[in-house]
């Protein structure tokens, strides 16, 4: 009886202890006409602060993991409306298709600037936010 009670309390309070990620990043490659790949990068703001500027790199790698190309992409400029909490921003980039071995694509955030904050940060999944300017 006590075990069931403790288990139900644990299930009830589990969402309070969940670690929130500041960004939800989705990278979706799309094949176009059998010759090109359009890579859509979508980033959702999971923080409670609006984002004024967001920039990063699309990393193109072989199936073995060797880096082939790195392309800078600015998702949100300072002159655009800020990205509010829970909202998403999407940008696309075009690559040539390698028909022998398809390439993998990842996105890494390099610069984040919050509205009303003069400091610039970078973000890494394991290290978190690091102030760079």
Image: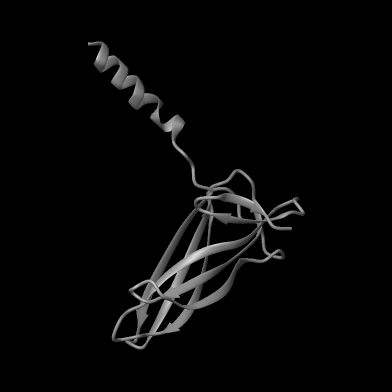
Q: Residue 123 at what x, y percent from top left?
A: 58, 55
Count of numbered badges drawn on the protein: 0
In front of the other: 82 or 43: 43
Residue at x 34% of width, y 87% of height: 33
* Residue shown at 30% from the left, 86% from the top: 99
Q: Determine whether, in the image, residue 90 is placed left or right of residue 2.
A: right
Which of the image's four quarters has the C terminus?
A: bottom right
Instruction: Note whether 39 is above or below 90 in the view shown.
Output: below
Locate residue 54: give its quadrant: bottom right
Q: Residue furthest left?
A: 1
Q: Position of residue 127 (x, y in %)?
A: 55, 50
- Residue 39 lies, in percent from the top left, at 44, 74
Image-based side of 129 in relation to 69, left or right: right
The answer to which of 125 and 80 lies nearer the viewer is 125
Q: Please tell me which residue lies in front, 89 or 57.
A: 57
Image height check: is 10 above or below 119? Answer: above
Q: Residue at x 32, y 87 (%)?
A: 34
Quarter of the picture holding the N terminus: top left
Image vertical order of residue 31 relative to residue 26, above or below: below
Q: Position of residue 26 (x, y in %)?
A: 43, 61
């Amino acid at each position: 009886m006590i075990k069931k009670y403790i288990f139900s309390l644990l299930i009830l309070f589990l969402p309070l202890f969940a670690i929130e990620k500041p960004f939800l990043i989705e990278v979706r490659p799309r094949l176009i006409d059998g010759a090109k790949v359009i890579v859509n990068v979508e980033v959702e703001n999971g923080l409670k602060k609006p984002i004024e500027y967001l920039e990063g790199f699309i990393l193109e790698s072989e199936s073995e993991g060797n880096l082939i190309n790195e392309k800078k992409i600015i998702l949100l400029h300072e002159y655009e409306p800020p990205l509010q909490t829970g909202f998403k921003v999407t940008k696309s980039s075009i690559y040539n298709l390698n028909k022998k071995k398809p390439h993998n694509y990842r996105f890494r955030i390099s610069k984040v600037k919050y509205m009303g904050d003069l400091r610039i940060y970078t973000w890494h999944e394991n290290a978190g936010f690091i102030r760079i300017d």
